[in-house]
Structure formats: C-alpha cells, structure tokens
Amino acid sequence: MVSYVSALLYGMGGIVVAGMALLVAFQEKLVYVPVLPGLTKSYALTPARLRLSYEDVWLRSSDGVRLHAWFIKLFPECRGPTILFFQENAGNIAHRLEMVRIMIQRLNCNVFMLSYRGYGASDGYPSQHGITRDAQAALDHLSQRTDIDTSRIVVFGRSLGGAVGAVLTKNNPDKIAALLLENTFTSILDMAGVLLPFLKWFIGKSSKGPRILNFLVRSPWSTIDVIGQIKQPILFLSGLQDEMVPPVHMQLLYAKAAAHNRQCLFVDFPTGMHMDTWVAGGDHYWKTIQLFLEEHVPEKKENESSRNRNDFEVR
C-alpha cells in the first residue's frame, strides 16, 4: 500500500515537473504563432490583391521595435469610424484581409491592421509587454492623423486580439470610443488548462486547485482583470461553437464588464466557431456591429454644428 501511494505521489510530482518544463520552455510558442505550418512569415497577399486602397505604415514602438501596419480606407476622404484591428495569435494580418474587406464595405469604415512584433513584416519577438507597447504605438499614430475623425476610433479584437484591445482601451479612455470583443478568453492562465487539461489543477485564474504554476506564465493576458475597468461601450460577439476558447469565457467577461458598465451588449451566434463567427453570423453579425456603432459612435453632424456656430455668431 505504501509503495502504491509513493508511486502515485511520484507520478503526480512528475506531472507537475513536466508541466513546469513545458511552460518554461515552450509557452511563447504556444501563445504566439506568427508562422502557420507550411507557410512563411511573409504576407501571402496584400490589400491591393483585393483592390483595396491602402497605405503601408511603419511605426516605432516605445522600446524602439520597428512595426508594420496596413491602413485601409474605404475611400480617400472617408470620415466614418476607424477600426483598430487586433488579430488572433496565429498567422498574420494578410490572413484576415477577406474579413476586413467585407468589414469596410458593410460598416463604411477605415481599418488599421497592426502586425504585432515578430509577426508579418514587424521586427522583434512577441511578448505581452511588447505587444502592449505595439498597440499603444498604433493608437498614438491614429490619434495624430488629420485624415480621419479621431473621435471615432474603435478597437476590434478577436481571441488574443481581444486581450490586447481590452488593455489598450482601459489605458486610453479619451482616445478610444468603443471596444468590440470576439471569442476572447478570460486569461491565458485559464486557457492553459483548456489546451493542456492536466494543468487545470495547478494553473488558472478560475482554477479550484492550488494554482502553483501561475507565476511561471510570462504572458498571462488576464482580460478578466481588465474588462471591469473599461468605461467605454463594449460589444461582445460570441460564437457558441467555438472549438478553441470555451464560450463560457465570453460570458464571464460580459458579466464582469456589465457589473460596472451599463454600455455593454452581448450577442451570441449559435453556429459560430472560433475563426468563422463573422461568416456563420452572416447579415446578423454585421448588422449587430453596425447598429452598435450607430448608437455609440455616431457620425458628427458637421452641417448642423456649423449652422449652430453661425447662429451664435449672428446673435
């Protein structure tokens, strides 16, 4: 009996050690996947292939890393909302171009697509601290442009991009008008137990276990700790067939946000998976976003404002 218990304890210890080794050695490779299997780091296509008018933008993050982005406009003088788009953890911005093409047409908006450090044509290596700096550099760039309505900058983030966008939105209440989150996780800590089930007893924000491995995670991306601090309107878009991030993560994020923010809306799509909710949702998906933006990020009535100023001057 004693030998059996000892073997069991040794086995559990081995699992913990194995988990620690995996986290220490490979966590960045699990969280950040700039190159999809069988593909190269370079862009497979550019907006020009889809006949989109765009600008190559080169930025410097606050720590000096050189970043690349595409700024795509519906037409040169478009004053509609400008969506700052943050992608998922795998691939690069070229893999999101078809979705962005439809976004521009359906929402009459501009879209700024940032390549995180280590992704696409951007230099450096991805990390939470670094990508947070990258997102801020992108927003600072947009805020200084004179060819857009800077009061209508909206952040859109899917999966990892939602975690990035949530931090940026919290940190910039005066620069960002609204936040759109799609299929985003509560934290990487909780996702560790989803991807590697044996770890759920030792790691996670929501774990009931001792969570003794949390300190090893270098990119925790704890969206659940951030979402309740956001004051801007938030739209939650959840695919109920998400095979990567359990839909309950989005429900938990919404509950945390709505407890502090009355400008939150949760919409689910019964057949939406992790990457195709925008396809599965069809017209309902785009109409949901359109109505949300019309309510919370309305177009300025410049003619009316000008007329009011003139009336004041006459008086």
Image (cartoon, rainbow, N blue to C red):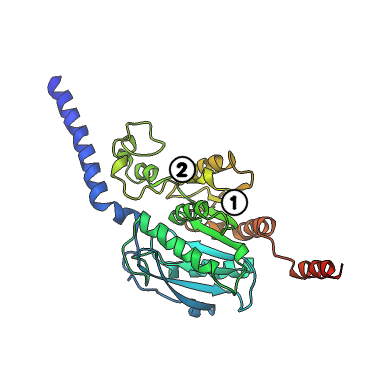
Is there any visible trace of residue 91 in the rendered image?
Answer: yes
Q: Is residue 27 left or right of residue 171?
A: left
User: Where is 132 relative to 253, above or below?
Assistant: below
User: Where is 81 relative to 186, above or below?
Assistant: below
> At which x and y percent is residue 93?
44, 68
Residue receiving disc 1: 232
Q: Which residue is nearer to you in this view: 177 or 191? A: 177
Is there any visible trace of residue 89 in the rendered image?
Answer: no
Splitting the image into 4 quarters, where does residue 307 fall? bottom right
Q: Which residue is nearer to you in this view: 2 or 64? A: 64
Callout count: 2
Q: Is residue 291 left or right of residue 28?
A: right
> At which x and y percent is residue 119?
36, 66
Residue receiving disc 2: 225
Amino acid of disc 2: Asp
| Label 1 element class | loop
